[in-house]
Amino acid sequence: MVVLFSCQKEKKEAKVIVPEVVEEEKAPPVIKEFGYVLDNFKVVKDTIKPGDSFGAIMDTHGISRAKVFEITNKIKDTFNVARIMAGKPYMLLKTKDTTEKAQVFVYQNNKIDYTVIDFRDSIIAQKRKKPVKLVEKTASGTIHSSLMQTFDDLDLNFLVAYKMADIYAWTIDFTRLQAGDRFKVMYTEKFIDDTIPAGIDQIKASYFEHVGKPIYAFRFENDSINGSIDYFDEEANNLRRAFLTAPVKFSRISSRYNLRRRIKYYGNRIRPHRGTDFAAPIGTPILATADGIVTKSERKGGNGKYVKIRHNATYDTQYLHMSRQAVKVGQFVKQGDVIGYIGMTGNTAGPHVCYRFWKNGREVDPFKQDLPASKPLSDSLRPQFFKYIEPIKATLDSIQFKPQEIL
């Protein structure tokens, strides 16, 4: 019998030792707002209620009247506490101990601007702004009813429509847009924390095709023209005119200048209408159509409450039937300033403003006047302007029109 023995030792399985992983506890994220680490305070956020005052809010949170007086007196040159408005949010930072002593008050003027009143040691008030990111955007559309309706249907920011109306206020009557009119626009929108919309910054360029006529608009500013900003077409013509085409935005003309108008109420007799009526809801702002001096701001007979403006030796304008005036005699107003609000004072059957236009002391139809334009871009700036708009126009032209479906 043969017995075999092996001299080779049995192999042992290799053991792999995996080091134990100990997860480090992550520190909670530091939450900062308005420049303060909120975890360091007891935070109270609220909104100014009707009837609230700074003193009453402070009193609610344990600040004495003497301290409130000291704070308001110290910060009066920076922040007038009497002007806090209902609906505005505010934040109060208090100590985290048992006293919960108020130390900082933050008032939000709007989405971007806010005021900080810090009274922990000394009393300091500062006006600050939240960081804002500008995002370039484009939009286009075809109109079937109105500009505002088109923006609403396309879910576009209506503030862009308002700015476009301002740009073309001298060249396009927005009360008479036609189906098939279309637009393209390049603009920048403001965002807080990259996600919170904070309004429109500016329109960089736009294209509006009205009744088949294309009108470009390019924003141009230059230090050599005192930093002024205007919109010019592709040939460097200024789009601004001496007079706006209408004293009310997005209104409709309910009655035109007509010296042969017959009115049934007066036995179908001729009663000349020497103004242009723009219908709009009560309270709608009425705008000065050009720079000038207010010569009348009163209530008189069938005119109701009205304002009259002297623009120069040639032109005057008048705005009738206001619910209230917003300017006084002798006051200088700029084109686009609010001078009053739509109403029904005097002889009127509905809310509107009767816009009257004088040339050399005689009432005329403003839509039939060859009104002066603003000064064009100087010859010395034209080469710079054309070079500047070349890539912008190329981008604008490449934007495709979005069809507007009729619902």
Image: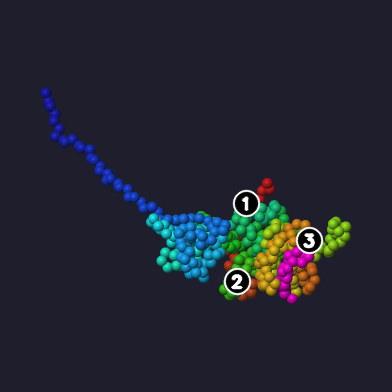
Residue 303 falls inside the magenta stretch: yes
Q: Start and end of the magenta stretch?
A: 293-313
Residue situated in front as seen by the camera: 113 or 249: 113
The CA distance from mark 2 to mark 3 is 42 Å
Nearer the observer: mark 3 or 1; the answer is 3
Whether residue 150 can be seen here: yes
Nearer the observer: mark 2 or 3; the answer is 3
Badge 2, how many Cα within 10 Å: few under 14, some, many 20+?
Answer: few
Q: Secondary structure at mark 3?
A: loop
**Residue drawn at 66 percent across, 53 percent down:** 149
Main secondary-structure element of the magenta-colored stretch: strand
**Residue drawn at 57 percent across, 73 percent down:** 223
Q: Which residue is mark 2?
A: 228
Q: Earlier in the sequence, mark 2 or mark 1?
A: 1
Amino acid under disc 1: Leu
Q: Which residue is mark 3?
A: 347
Q: Which residue is mark 1?
A: 154
Disc 2 and disc 1 in contact, CB within 8 angstroms = no
